[in-house]
Amino acid sequence: MENSLKDKVAIVTGGTKGIGKAITETFLEAGAEVLVCARTRPEADISVSDRKAHFVSCDVRNSEDIKEVVELCQSEYGKLDILVNNAGGAPPADSASASEKFTKSIVDLNLIAPMIFSQVAGNLMRASSDSAVIINISSVSGMRPNPFGVAYGAAKAGIINATQTLALEWGPEIRVVSISAGLVLTEESRSFYGDDSTVGKIAETIPLGRMGSPQDVADACLFVASHKAGWLSGSNIVLHGGGERPNYLDAINHLGSSEP
């Protein structure tokens, strides 16, 4: 996929760390010009070889910030081919006691913000690109129960539906695809998953024997953004290493044994 994004311009939200940083670096390596936005400037520029991402300060929950990012993209590059709505996340919270403010903030970040960003960016994409694509980073939390994360799971379920709806409304000018990531190990998620021993136990529950990495998600984004995925739209790519082992299997002792 080397140079598969040459002459393309991309915006990656939350593109300065974790999954977003991996996406940014992968797109740079593939030849794209990449504009990354986040609330805080990274300590060092994100670059690959001699190619550097363009950082813009932005709170994606603020529609005026979003407009400024898209306007800057237009003035600097004259077009927009790829939008990756990656910014998101949520700390664990008990569903019975989470505050209204907390719940609204999680939904705003993980559902409302990518919808508004897609709307604003879509106007520039239609006017300037003949192969535009929006990639929404979702989660398996939006496809199954998500204890201690009801707002996050509901928001991610919403972005999967939004992906399907926008693909229907905006095709053929813009393709829209979501990637629902499973258990991905990042610097931030490690604080939730625990030490190497716990991570190893979690990995044992995944058919492919390991947790995902940011690069796994970035590689999927590279494929979706490339011409190789030219007929892919309205789809939700489930990227989870084969899924998670159901707990009930541990209670069925005879499964996997030679005895009836």
Image: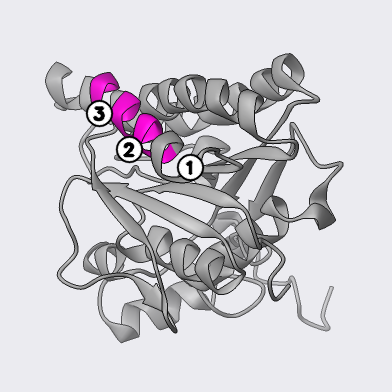
- Is 196 left or right of 201, judged from the image as shown? left
Q: Which labelled disc corresponds to residue 141?
A: 1
For disc 2, the marked residue is 149
Residue 259 against residue 229 in the figure, above or below: below
- Is 157 left or right of 231, judged from the image as shown? left
- Crowding near pointer 2: few (<14 within 10 Å), some, many (20+)? many
Judged from the image, the secondary structure of the residue bearing numbered disc 3 is: helix
- Is 229 left or right of 151, judged from the image as shown? right
Amino acid type, label 1: Ser
| Viewer can see residue 192 | yes
Write down the region rendered in magenta: 61-73
| Viewer can see residue 243 | no
Judged from the image, the secondary structure of the residue bearing numbered disc 2 is: loop
Judged from the image, the secondary structure of the residue bearing numbered disc 1 is: helix
Sequence-wise, the earlier of marks 3 and 1 is 3
Residue at image location 19% in from the left, 64% down from the top: 42
Q: Is residue 55 magenta?
A: no
| Quarter of the figure that contains the N terminus | bottom right
Q: Which labelled disc corresponds to residue 65?
A: 3
